[in-house]
Structure formats: C-alpha cells, structure tokens
Amino acid sequence: MKTIKIKHPYKKTEIVNEDIVLILGYFDGVHLAHQEVIKEGVRIGRERNLKVALMTFNRHPSIVYRKINAGQYASLTQPEQKEKIIESLGVDILYEVFFNSEFGNLPPQEFVDRYIVGWHAKVIVAGFDYTYGKADVASMAQLSDYAKGRFEIVKVGEAKESGKTISSTLIRQYIKNGEVEKANAMLGYSYETLGFVIHGDARGRELGYPTANIYSNPYTFLPGVGIYAVWFIVKGKRYMGMASIGYNVTFKDQSELSVEVNVLDFNEEIYGDDVKIEWVAYLRGEVQFDGAQGLIDQLQKDEEATRKILEMQKD
C-alpha cells in the first residue's frame, strides 16, 4: 500500500494520476462496520480493475471544532495500527489529509470538485453517516447533487453486533468501562495499545509476580481500572499476561494511573523495548488487600483464570 500525506492546497503531482475507487471516512478503530465499507470499496475496485484509494485525516475533525474535548480524547488506533489494518483489507493507496481550518472550511462543492473529482474518483464508497462539512448540507443525502453525474456513489448501511449499531463511540465506552470483550466483538479483533517498558518499583518481583511497567504511547485510550487477561507482544513474540491498570491501592495511594503486565512464562530484561498489549478479557476490579499475602492469593487465582481464557485463543 502506498501512503501519501496531503496538505491543502495539494499539488496535482502528489495525486496518483489514474482512475480510482475512493473510500471515505476517518475510520478510528477500523471496526467491523468500517471494515464492511472498506471491503465493499475493494470489491468494486477489483471487479472494475481500478486502484482502490482511501482518504482519512491525521486528526479527528471533531477535535478541531471542539465537538470533542481534546484533553479527554484518544484514538482507538495509533496511525501505524490504522495503516496496518487498512492495508490488510486490500487498499492500494492511503491518502492522509492534514486536517486544519483551511481544509475543514471548504464548501461542500469545492471539496467534491477538488478531493473527489480532482483525485480521479469514478466510484465513491462511504458509510451511511459520512459527512464532508456541516451535516445539514454535506451528508451522503446531498452528495449526488454535488457529484453532478461525474462519479458513482455507494452508501454502506449500518452494521450491528448483539443488536447494537457498531460505532467508535460505543466501542470507546465499552473499553472505558472495562468491557473489552464487547469492544472486541465490535472491532473484530482484540483491542491493542502500544508503548514501551520502563523501570518500576520492583514490588511485583518481591511478591513472585514481576511486572513490566508500560509507558503507553501519547493519546492512547486505555481500558478502565482493573485486572485483565492479555496477550503481550515483545521482540516479535507473543506471551500470555495479566495486566493491571490502576493506582497500586494495596501498597500506596498514587495519583498517576499505571499499566503493569505480569508476563507469564517469561524472564527477560526488556527495559526500553517497544511492546503491544492485546486486551482480551476483564478479570476483576482493583481491590485494596490487607497485606501482601492476600494479594498473592488473588494473583494466583488471576493467573489460573488468565491461562484458561488465553489457552482457548491459542492458534
């Protein structure tokens, strides 16, 4: 997949000079509903022997326009994760547009003329709720008026999981509540976070459950406080783990949220190494124990539950 970063106004030489199928959307999380949109675009492209391009943005438009509190917003997918999933679905060209006021304030007709017709799109594929400006004048319902017969429009309807419409907003709420199993069902894969290993206070080692302390990538959307069964990926290898997100309430009252993973059947020094965590299942909430032994007894139960859950997921 070829990735092209665009800043308005773009130069014609930056654009692939051939007819394309163009898929439109921000695609945060690239969940199952997003995947249906992308797969439809790829299917049409292969059927008509056209390259398939996807347009997305470097940041969420709602942050720019303060519809979302920027200080509380974090993406479900980091750019590299998003690109990897999109590429795996068969997209040929990824256009990442720098979203600023100059681009965001384009009138709908100008957006269509410059960024659809100007990009040689013969077919547009987007979700039913896609907008390219204010919803009352720039929704999928009005797109045919701006198209003026110059390209075909394919609108993909909503997708549901367990009777609920799949959306990034609902997935984010599930993750925040610790309901990662529900989130994963809508994503179509286990929710992933990225980071690297830093030094901790080594208390886990004293308890017989050493942990890797994780510094998460900036703007990472972390699951809610609790204990989870996870897959831990480091140096290209995948290990079972039980992760804790919390404040170490048994031993100290810390104000900063920490992410720690006890990696099962693992004894290597990995300080500074990049890691990925796949959040599989919620085990329990954070509990303040009377002392170390109470915590150790519970960790033994957590390990047993973790192994049972993850053994079922082994390839």
Image (cartoon, rainbow, N blue to C red):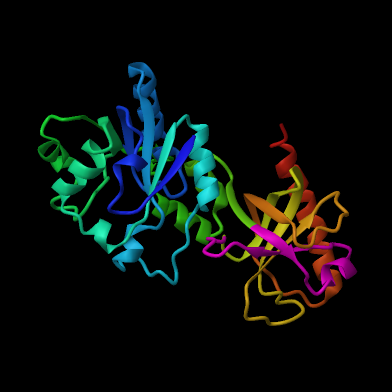
Query: Quick one: 312 or 41, which is closer to the camera?
Result: 41
Where is residue 146? Give x, y as percent: 12, 40
Q: Residue at x 65, y 59 (%)?
A: 195
Can residue 33 be seen in the rendering of this structure?
A: yes
- Please name whichever residue, 64 or 93, is drawn nearer the observer in this view of the structure: 93
Part of the protein shown in magenta: 195-222
Q: Is residue 248 above or below residue 147?
A: below
Residue drawn at (36%, 34%) of the image: 16
Residue 156 visible? The answer is no
Which image quadrant is residue 142 in? top left
Quadrant in which the C terminus is drawn: top right
The picture places residue 35, in percent across and down from the top left corner, at: 43, 36
Q: Where's residue 212, x and y in %?
A: 77, 62
Residue 198 colored in magenta in the image: yes
Taking depth in this image into account, of 149 and 75 the one nearest to the observer is: 149
Above or below residue 144? Residue 266 is: below
Estimate the x, y position of residue 61 in percent, counting from the top left.
Answer: 32, 58
